[in-house]
Amino acid sequence: MEKIGFVGLGIMGRPMALNLSKAGYSLAVYARRSEMMQPLTEVGAIGCESPQAVAEQSDIIFTMVSDTKDVEQVILGENGIIHGAKAGNLVIDMSSIAALATRKIAETLGKKGVEMLDAPVSGGDKGAIAGTLSIMVGGKTAQFERAKPLFDVMGGNIVHIGDNGAGQVAKTCNQVLVSQTIAAVGEALILAKAAGVDPANVRQALLGGFAGSKILEIHGQRMLDHDFEPGFKAQLHQKDIKIALQTAHDLGVALPGTALSSQYLNALMGTDQGELDSSAMVLALETLSNVKLK
Ligand code: NAP
């Protein structure tokens, strides 16, 4: 069995690493706040002092941190994975970051004979806990096949999209859809409430028809309850939409709906609410219409 390393044990990384441990893999882990490692060390994982130390003890090293600069830091920075990795090792970044940066990281690792896959996910904390994530993979076919048994532990719908960076492009497309759907669900529920109709009944009815979606189901309920505990933090969603808009800018592609949805996320950041779940976008819509769902 390949020895596994895991760097980044937040809302997503912790349950994903726990699922690998439950499946019988031996793990070396790193989190910059050492208390975050405890749930893993309690089940037998080795807690390490740096990403480099994780790599020294592993064949395949996962990263699940926040943003592009964080992935660059834990892989290429001081005490980063590259300094502990050996030729033949495989680094799998499951964070959501810019595709161009991913390709550059893969190139740098490649000079040392270290392989890389980008494998961002969708499915939220619930999917991470249940091991049912959608995983979008970029990189060589042989490395995809090598990693597939591990992806099977963490996910359900696992698709090899293309070369390095292709997984990140797919994830960006995912966020284009998700951000606009959250805004659309918020608009529909607010309209129902303003018209004097119970938005919970509207949600229930729409779930069975063409407008039904996981976002209407899960985020719609969060909006009705004003339960904005993350889940997926608005600040991370804003990061993803920034990547989408920058990519569209570079390619000369118009994404007017995505640009609009970014404004709700900006409003959350501007009001110190970036730590809330991204379904809190509805708070900005509530303010615009002076309608409260709860
Ligand atoms: P999170 O709870 O904030 O966890 C991120 C973890 O990465 C934190 O524990 C953080 O450490 C660590 N980290 C960040 N920068 C680091 C650095 N430079 N060096 C070392 N550790 C670093 O976020 P998350 O929700 O797990 O998301 C992780 C990634 O998955 C993001 O790219 C996100 O966009 C993506 N994603 C999230 C979801 C979701 O529903 N949550 C769904 C799909 C994809 P600290 O705890 O010390 O800050």
Image: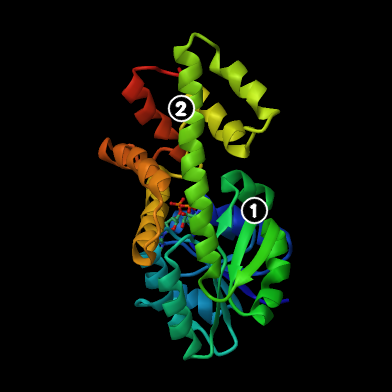
Tag 2: residue type? Glu
Say which label, 2 or 1, has the lower sequence index: 1
Q: Crowding at label 1, few (<14), some or many (≥20) Cα neighbours within 10 Å? A: many
Residue shown at 71% from the left, 60% from the top: 153
Give coordinates of residue 164: x percent, y percent: 53, 75
Q: Look at the image and tell me whether residue 50 can be seen.
A: no
Q: Quadrant of the C terminus?
A: top left
Residue shown at 45% from the left, 68% from the top: 99
- The residue tagged 1 is 133
Tag 1: residue type? Leu
- The residue tagged 2 is 187
Q: How is the image coloured?
A: rainbow
For marks 2 and 1, give the CA distance: 27 Å
The tag on residue 228 is: none
Q: Quadrant of the N terminus?
A: bottom right
Residue 151 vs residue 241, the one in the foreground = 241
